Image (cartoon, rainbow, N blue to C red):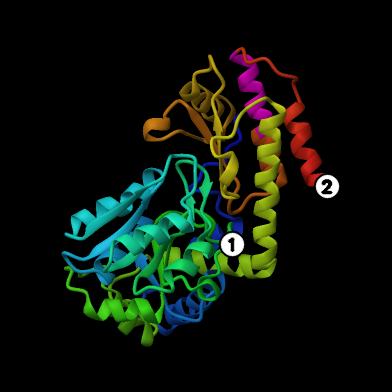
């Protein structure tokens, strides 16, 4: 018998109360019953985003909210600073090109984080940049970015700061209003603990002013249409209402735990993974800027990284993620976000040890599990 454990950086496990909520009989979305659920979900999102402004909801993956940020804030011919430090940072550049926006690219070595100083220098050398597009947690590399420091730089300019927090929101600190982040985009299947299919975007007053001037084509992802509908506690198009019901249940769980407590839990789980890796003699891909949402670990010499991930998943039921793009076969990634606790991490480390041992990697069996347990006991 195989019992499944999901420790991929999205989708993440869904709590039973959320699953039960989504299993209720379907209701119509243009009704007072759904409006009450939608209103409660919108208030819950403001709590998690740490904003008093609107948080727009789209039926799409997180990439839909990224696209919405580009096409609503910018116009063809505008310049945007795109921070590339991994596969998902590169998506900002691709979206800019799709809408005729000129990307000023800050290329960051994979495994390292963009610095506020580098962004400040690029902004000073390239006048007229209207948006800075960056990432809170780069899923492909396990890197966390100092968004607070970057916001201090960007807020002094005309540019809007847009942050992809798809893999970080709810797991890594992101104080939208306090730091001065203009747009934060997120997805449902990460720290928010529901299946894929919803995307979100918080929008500041500075960003709304840019939206009024934007000339990029838009229809489904129109910020203004979504805002107009929100005033009536509605959506401009048919929403994924079952997912919204699930979202509402997940937000209740986050509120009950408390956002600060949730972030502290993620920090402890990530440290347990990192300490376990060190105890097994495994190197971190991003040791200097590790995210608390997902940890990228280097595959040891002589071990088939793709086979490692496949064996853990198919023979033991423990799902982790392999490397993407140029990191394929070179790293594996263990998530520590969403509906997870210390025992999920212990199971994952235990399984990792078993499979590494089977593949011929030499280490003291139990060393990783012991290291993780010490973190949780501490």
Query: Residue 10 magenta-drawn?
Result: no
The image shows residue 105 at horizontal and vertical percentages of: 31, 51
> Mark 2 or mark 1, which has the lower sequence index?
1
The reply to whether residue 65 is visible in this rendering is: no
Q: What residue is shown at x 66% (from left), y 22% (from top)?
A: 354
Q: Looking at the rendering, which quadrant does residue 329 occupy?
A: top left
Quadrant in the picture for residue 67: bottom left
- Viewer-side residue, 319 vs 15: 319
What is the C-alpha distance between the residues marked 2 and 1? 22 Å
Callout 2: SS = loop
In contact (CB < 8 Å): disc 2 and disc 1: no
Element at badge 1?
loop
Residue 289, position as x, y percentages in the image: 57, 46
Which residue is at a point 26% across and 69% down the rendered structure image? 128
**What range of the chain is rendered magenta?**
349-359
- Near-viewer residue (7 or 249): 7
- Which residue position is annotated with label 2? 378
Vertical comparison of 295 with 89: above or below: above
Circle 1 Cα neighbour tier, 10 Å, few/some/many (<14 / 14–19 / ≥20): many
User: What residue is rendered at 48% in x and 48% in y?
Assistant: 11
Q: Quadrant of the N terminus?
A: top right
Rendered image: mark on residue 173 = 1
The x and y percentages for residue 13 are 56, 49
The 10 Å Cα crowd at callout 2, few under 14, some 14 to 19, many 20 or more, is: few
Residue placed most toward the observer, 236 or 166: 166
């Amino acid at each position: 018998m195989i019992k499944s454990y999901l420790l991929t950086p999205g989708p993440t496990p869904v709590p039973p109360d959320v699953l039960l909520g989504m299993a209720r009989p379907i209701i119509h979305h243009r009704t007072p019953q759904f409006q009450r659920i939608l209103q409660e979900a919108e208030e819950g999102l403001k709590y998690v985003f740490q904003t008093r402004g609107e948080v727009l909801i789209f039926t799409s993956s997180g990439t839909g909210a990224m696209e919405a940020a580009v096409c609503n804030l910018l116009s063809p011919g505008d310049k945007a600073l795109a921070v590339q430090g991994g596969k998902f940072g590169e998506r900002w550049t691709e979206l800019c090109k799709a809408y005729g926006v000129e990307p000023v690219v800050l290329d960051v070595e994979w495994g390292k984080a963009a610095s506020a100083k580098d962004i400040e220098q690029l902004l000073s050398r390239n006048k007229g940049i209207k948006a800075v597009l960056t990432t809170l947690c780069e899923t492909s590399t396990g890197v966390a970015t100092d968004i607070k420091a970057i916001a201090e730089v960007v807020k002094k300019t005309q540019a809007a700061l847009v942050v992809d927090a798809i893999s970080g929101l709810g797991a890594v600190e992101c104080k939208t209003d306090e730091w001065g982040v203009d747009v934060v985009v997120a997805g449902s299947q990460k720290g928010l603990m529901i299946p894929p299919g919803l995307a979100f975007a918080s929008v500041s007053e500075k960003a709304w002013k840019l939206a009024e001037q934007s000339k990029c084509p838009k229809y489904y992802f129109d910020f203004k249409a979504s805002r107009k509908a929100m005033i009536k506690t509605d959506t401009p198009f048919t929403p994924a209402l079952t997912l919204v019901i699930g979202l509402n249940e997940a937000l209740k769980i986050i509120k009950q735990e408390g956002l600060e407590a949730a972030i502290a839990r993620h920090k402890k789980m990530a440290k347990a993974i990192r300490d376990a890796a060190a105890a097994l003699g495994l190197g971190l891909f991003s040791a200097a800027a590790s995210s608390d949402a997902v940890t990228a670990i280097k595959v040891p010499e002589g071990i088939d990284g793709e086979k490692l991930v496949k064996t853990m998943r198919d023979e033991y039921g423990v799902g982790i993620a392999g490397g993407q793009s140029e990191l394929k076969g070179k790293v594996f990634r263990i998530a520590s976000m969403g509906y997870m606790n210390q025992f999920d991490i212990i199971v994952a480390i235990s399984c990792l040890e078993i499979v590494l041992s089977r593949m011929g990697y030499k280490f003291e069996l139990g060393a990783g599990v012991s290291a993780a347990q010490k973190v949780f006991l501490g």
